Amino acid sequence: MRLAVISDIHANKEALDEVMESIKHRSINSIFCLGDLVNYGTDFEYCIDFVENRAETCVMGNHDSTVIGRDPLWHMNREARRSARWTMARLTHEQRSYLESLPMDHSHNDILFTHGSPESPDRWHYITNWFDAARQFDNFQERICMVGHSHIPGIYNNREEGNFYSERIHSLDPESRYIVNVGSVGQPRDRDPRASYVVIDEGEGTVEFVRVEYDVEKASKKIASEGMSNFNARRILEGI
């Protein structure tokens, strides 16, 4: 089985469409989503509908949780709060119900899918480096844990210190366990504005990081035109 894992779409239709075009050419059997379908971007309706109908499973992200009222707005910075309020005012009952149905995590074939970290997934811990990752290996039983949340791609194992991310296919050591941060479709923050996602080949025992060009200027102009956040409109142009 070949799985595509996407995360942190953040209502960015332009990025999602190009990622899906890339996935179409990679013989993917199933798509898994790690949450944060909404906020920052403008096309939350499109992104929710896509994930609901195309993904095998989607887990809850912190922005999803906030717009349905499970997490308080004050947990977010000012720019994120503005975007969340804009989204909350426009969510339909059906969209809210779908977001409310999302689980905090999901286990499949020795792979755990969660948004932030396996430790108290509703607390939204970040994994941005090996030291963050090292503390998490005792918090899940599966061989691989797939996360997003930080918008920074990474691959960490429990036997060797470091982040071994690069835009290529990584062969997994059968003696090691892994935490893989898939990065972000809609708002990368590793100073590379290209959309990021991961392909897992269960038969070959590999993880591939894929980066995809998209019309980031169009997405940025949409955010600015809605008056949501000039800062968020600018940051996606630079991947910060």
Image: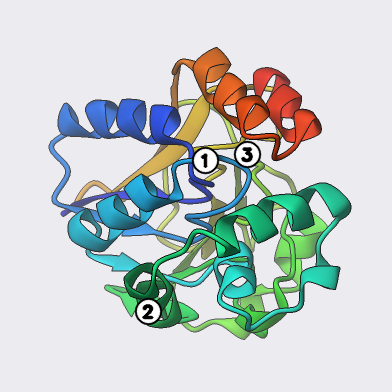
Q: Position of residue 228 (x, y in %)?
A: 70, 40
The residue at the point 48 percent across, 45 percent down is: 9
- Tell me: 13 left or right of 193: left
Q: Identify residue for label 1.
A: 42
Task: Name the foreground residue: 201 vs 74.
Answer: 74
Q: Identify residue for label 2.
A: 97
Label 3 with label 1: CB-CB less than 8 Å: no
Q: Mark 3 and mark 1: span between their CA atoms?
A: 33 Å
Instruction: Please state which of the two labelled residues, at mark 2 or mark 3, is closer to the viewer.
Output: 2
Residue 164 disc label? 3
The residue at the point 57 percent across, 62 percent down is: 89
Q: Mark 2 and mark 3: span between their CA atoms?
A: 38 Å
Within-10-Å neighbours for mark 1: few <14, some 14–19, many 20+:
many
- Tell me: 143 left or right of 28: right
Residue 129 showing in the rendered view: no
Residue 61 sits in quarter: bottom right
The residue at the point 45 percent across, 50 percent down is: 44
